[in-house]
Image (spheres, grey):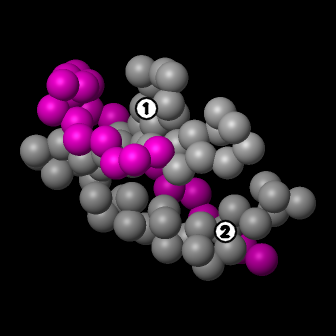
Amino acid sequence: MGTTTTTATAPATPPATAGIVWDEAFCSEGANCFRFGRDPEGRAYIGTTGSAVYVTDSIDALRALVSAVKAGAADHLLA
C-alpha cells in the first residue's frame, strides 16, 4: 500500500477566530469531541471542544481529507 504525504501551508497570520462558524461537535466516549467550522473567506477548520487550538486549510483540502478517511486511509490508526 502506498503512502501519500500532503503538506499544507498555513497563512502567515492566522485568521481571527471570531468569524468561524462551528458545527455541532462530533463526540464519542464522553469528552472526545471534534468540531468542524468555516469562515466567511471559505477556509475550513477542525478543532476540539474545550480548546482554542485548531487546524485550518481550504474547503477543497478538507474535502480531500474526508474522502481519504472514508476510503480507509486512517484505518491503521484504529487497530
* 12 in magenta: yes
Question: Where does label 2 land, which residue?
Answer: 73
Q: Amino acid at mark 2?
A: Ala
Instruction: Find residue 39 and report its horizontal and vertical position in percent.
Output: 18, 42
- 1 or 2: mark nearer the eye: 1
Camera sees residue 76: yes
Question: Which quadrant holds residue 4?
Answer: bottom right
Instruction: Find residue 15 and report its horizontal and vertical position in percent.
Output: 21, 28
Location of the N terminus (image quadrant): bottom right
| Near-viewer residue (49 or 77) | 49
Residue pictured at 22% horizontal, 36% vertical = 20
Q: Amino acid at mark 1?
A: Tyr
The furthest residue to the right: 79
| Numbered disc total | 2
Instruction: Classify 23 as above or below 10.
Output: below
Distance from disc 1 to disc 2, alpha carbons, whole Å, reads: 21 Å
Q: Mark 1 falls on what kind of element?
A: strand
Question: Where does label 1 land, which residue?
Answer: 54
